[in-house]
Amino acid sequence: ETGVTQTPRHLVMGMTNKKSLKCEQHLGHNAMYWYKQSAKKPLELMFVYSLEERVENNSVPSRFSPECPNSSHLFLHLHTLQPEDSALYLCASSQGTGDANTEAFFGQGTRLTVV
Amino acid sequence: LAKTTQPISMDSYEGQEVNITCSHNNIATNDYITWYQQFPSQGPRFIIQGYKTKVTNEVASLFIPADRKSSTLSLPRVSLSDTAVYYCLAYNQGGKLIFGQGTELSVKP
C-alpha cells in the first residue's frame, strides 16, 4: 500500500466508448503524474500537475484528457481510443516537483485494453 | 535532465550480491540519483537516493564516485523476490521523473 489508489484496476473499452481513470492520494502531496507503460517498454510521462496546475504535457493525443480538481485527486478521461492505447496507466504523486530529492509514490495502475 | 544508461538485463542466483551500474555522464551539479524497483503490472517503488559517496538503507546501498558520472546500486544477498526491473534516474529541482529502459534483473534458485 503506497497511499496512492487507482481505480479501476482493469478496464476493457471499445474504441467509441468514453471512460475515466481515477487516482487518489492522501499523502498531502502537491504534485501528481500520469504515466503510460506499454508492454515491455519503459514508463512514458504523460502529464504532470503541481498544485492543481498542469505543468507538463508531453505531446499526448487529445483523446487523453486529464483533470485535477484538487491536490488529492487526478483523473484521466478517455475517448475514442485506439487499440495501441492499450497499456498500464500509472498514477504517481510526490511532495512537489520543485524538490530535487523528491520520492514519488505510485499506484498499482489501471490495465487498459481497447478493443 | 541527465540521460542515464544501464544494462538491459542481468542474471543472478539467490544469495549473491548484485551490483547494477548506471552511467550518467552529463549529470548536472544539482541532480540527485534515484533508483526505483518495478514488479510486473505494478507501479515502480522507490529504493534509494543519493547525491555523492555512499548511501545505505535496509534494502540496498548506493555508491556514487566523486565525479558522479556513474552510480552503482548494490543489492545484498538477493532472493527470488528481487526479480524485477530496476530504474536509475538523475534529476534536479523542477525536474520531471523520466524513466529510461531500466535493468531487468532475473534471480534464479
Image (spheres, rainbow, N blue to C red):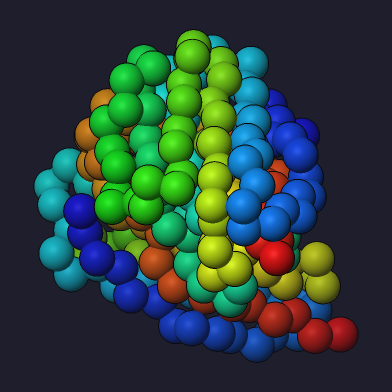
Instruction: Looking at the picture, tell me which residue is in the foreground, A1 or B57.
Output: A1
**Residue A48 coordinates in the image, percent (x, y):** 37, 35
Q: Is residue B17 above or below residue A31?
A: below
Q: Is residue B10 left or right of residue B88?
A: right
**Residue A100 coordinates in the image, percent (x, y):** 29, 35
Q: Is residue A42 left or right of residue A21?
A: left
Residue that appears at 39% across and 66% down: B100
Q: Quadrant of residue A28?
A: top right
Instruction: Looking at the picture, tell me which residue is in the foreground, B32 or A6.
Output: A6
Q: Quadrant of residue B11?
A: bottom right
Quarter of the image with the N terminus of chain A in it? top right
Q: How many marks?
A: 0
Q: Is residue A104 above or below residue B77?
A: above
On the question of residue B70 being in view, the answer is no
Residue that appears at 71% across and 53% down: A13
**Residue B40 coordinates in the image, percent (x, y):** 72, 65
Q: Is residue B87 above or below residue B18?
A: above
Farthest-out residue, front: A16
**Residue A27 coordinates in the image, percent (x, y):** 59, 18
Q: Is residue A29 left or right of residue A96?
A: right
Q: Quadrant of residue A72?
A: top right
On the question of residue B13 being in view, the answer is yes
Residue that appears at 61% across and 73% down: A39
Farthest-out residue, right: B109
Residue that appears at 62% across and 41% down: A18
Quarter of the image with the C terminus of chain A in it? bottom right
Q: Is residue B11 above or below residue A69?
A: below
